[in-house]
Image (cartoon, helix red, strand yellow):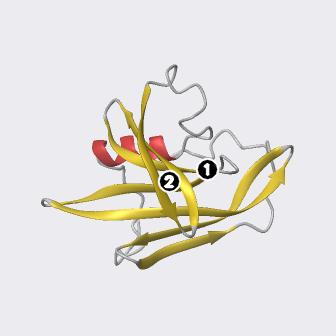
Amino acid sequence: MDPNAETPKPTYLPASASLEFSADAEFDDPLVSYEAKGYTLDYAGTEDWYGRRAFKLFVTRRHVTGYYLLVDAETYFIVGKKSVRDLGFGREIPIETRYDDFRPVAGIIMPHRVVVTSEDKPLHETRMRHVRPNAPVPPNAFAMPGR
């Protein structure tokens, strides 16, 4: 739903946005079984990422625009993502996603803070106080509302 709409109502995403959304929603990152999932990874050097050295990987997948994944050179945690969002009408904006506050959840180290910015302006921040692994999901949890 578009939260900025005068009367929010459920709508389907356009095809291009749908592909990008589904790629972002994957539980495993692109480093896990990347070839089997259709990803290509290209090493793009190192970069200073918020005061830490990070390996920069260019990630591409069929039907989805490529992006850079930043992997901490010491911990090997994925600490960032740099992408470009198409706003339509030929307008694109750079998007940076930063992952931090890593803590163990059921034996897996996960970020508990996600900060998304564009051109150094904050877009949104998500902080997780608690993560419940393998929580039961009702069968209709992802059905279009009102159907």
> Which quadrant holds residue 129?
bottom right
Check disc 2 and give the amino acid type. Answer: Gly
Secondary structure category for the residue under label 2: loop
- Mark 1 and mark 2 lie on one chain; the one further toward the N terminus is 1
Other residues around mark 2 within 10 Å, as few (<14) / some (14–19) / many (≥20): few
Task: State the residue in front, 17 or 64.
Answer: 64
Q: Which mark is residue 146?
A: 2
| Image location of residue 61, percent across then percent down | 38, 32
* Residue under the image location 83 percent in, 52 percent down: 104
Residue 147 seen anywhere in this rendered image of the structure = no
Check disc 1 and give the amino acid type. Answer: Ala
Outermost residue toward the left in this view: 89
Outermost residue toward the top in this view: 36
Nearer mark to the viewer, of 1 and 2:
1
| Image location of residue 26, percent across then percent down | 56, 40
| Image location of residue 57, percent across then percent down | 45, 42
| Image location of residue 134, percent across then percent down | 79, 42
For mark 1, what is the residue?
A: 73
* Residue under the image location 46 percent in, 41 percent down: 23
